[in-house]
Amino acid sequence: MAEAAELPDRESLQGYQLRVVREVLLALLAGEASHGYQLRARLALALGPLAGALNDGQVYVTLNRLEKAGLVTSERVGQADKPDRRVYELTPAGRHQVTEWLDDTSWPKPAPAEFHLKLVAAAAAGLADPVGIVDRQRRALLGGLGQAQRAALAEPSGSVAAILLEGVVLRLQADLRWLEACARHWNAAKEG
Amino acid sequence: MDGNDSVLSARGLRKDYGSGSGLVHAVRDVSLDLSEGEAVAIVGPSGCGKSTLLYLLGGLERPTAGTLQLAGRRLEQMPEAGLARLRRHALGFVFQAFHLVDELTALENVELPALLAGASPRKARERATALLEQVGLEDRLQHLPSALSGGERQRVAIARALANGPEVVLADEPTGNLDSAATTEVLRLFDRLHNDGQTLVVVTHDERIAATADRLITMRDGAFVDETKLTGGRARSLTEITGLDA
């Protein structure tokens, strides 16, 4: 756990960030020792059309940092006709971190609280019409839902990435229903 | 815009029910232009008038006031026989409860509109077979509706709606009776129709259908209160939506 604390702050990492890359890499390594290219391919498969979020060098950079933090070790393995490749293996500390991550039931930071407070603040300060803010948010979510839905429909049946996209779709649907409730509330507040 | 280049054009449509103190304004002063190949979703709370509007657009109900033009022809004053003919040739309907004929097989249900429109039995059968293939039901041709799942029944109904190559397909809560997997099947089918250039109007509660339309219209108390163009604008990236970026 002390090792985990020494990991660089996520926010300080450069480039496109995939929040879960660190944890996912550790979990994949808990199954078997692998080299970077294999890990990257497995992540890409799991993410399907979303794999573009994965910056090319990110897997390697993250593995490097994990090694410095003592969560993985690596060994150079020679290959005929090709450059050596580095095979990564989980350390006991890394294994502990994976277990903790898998047991953690907290959900990614939910949008509701911040958005809700934005509406309350906008109304209180008379800065903006909360219903207008809700409408804008609704359009953005609908646009996103349309994209996610189209991406999901384009996946072949049995695709593992389709399950991720279905999750995105269902959550956006839930968010949209909540926005409807927000609109009803702030409309009533305006009329009352 | 006078609606001349629209497939379907409505001006100041109104529909009242009842009279005196029981008078209900189901649809108030609605104007709408549908371009060829456009998919429009109409959403709103129950009782907002969206289904009534769909029935007006499809010539299934006559407006109290306003004008309606489909493929260059005025609908609101057309005699019933002409209207029925126009509905058969130019419109396809999909309903929440499927409305298939229980005694007829899938194939017979789909060929019925072509037969009614005067197609030869052979032509009607060919077309119906092709359409059922298109909706992935080539191995269900001889099944009665009762032997089909909800999703399959709705796909038969969609094939039937396409039987006469309609200008516009009108769908009223097409996924309202379906579970999530069957909804996906229907969504996939609508998506394909849309890509093939079929003009579509869908009344729906389902945000998933609404979000894949080109244009989303929100109704409240019989009137349009919001209109959002969903395609063509700057869209957020999928990674942003998914939370894959920081």
Image: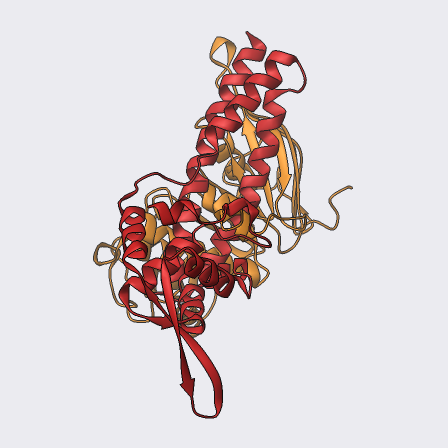
Corner quadrant of residue B109: bottom left
Q: Position of residue A179 (x, y in %)?
A: 49, 29
Q: Position of residue B93 (x, y in %)?
A: 46, 49
Q: Position of residue A53 (x, y in %)?
A: 53, 57
Give the residue displayed 66% in from the left and 13% down from the top: A126
In the rendered view, would you say A125 is above or below A106? above
Corner quadrant of residue B157: bottom left
Which chain, by letter, is red? A
Camera-nearest residue between A123 and A40? A40
Can the viewer see residue B112 in this picture?
no
View extreme (left): residue: B147
Camera-nearest residue between A139 and B227? A139
Colour assigned to chain B in the rendering is orange
Name the quadrant of the N terminus of chain B.
top right
Give the residue displayed 58% in from the left and 12% down from the top: A190
Give the residue displayed 47% in from the left and 67% down from the top: B119
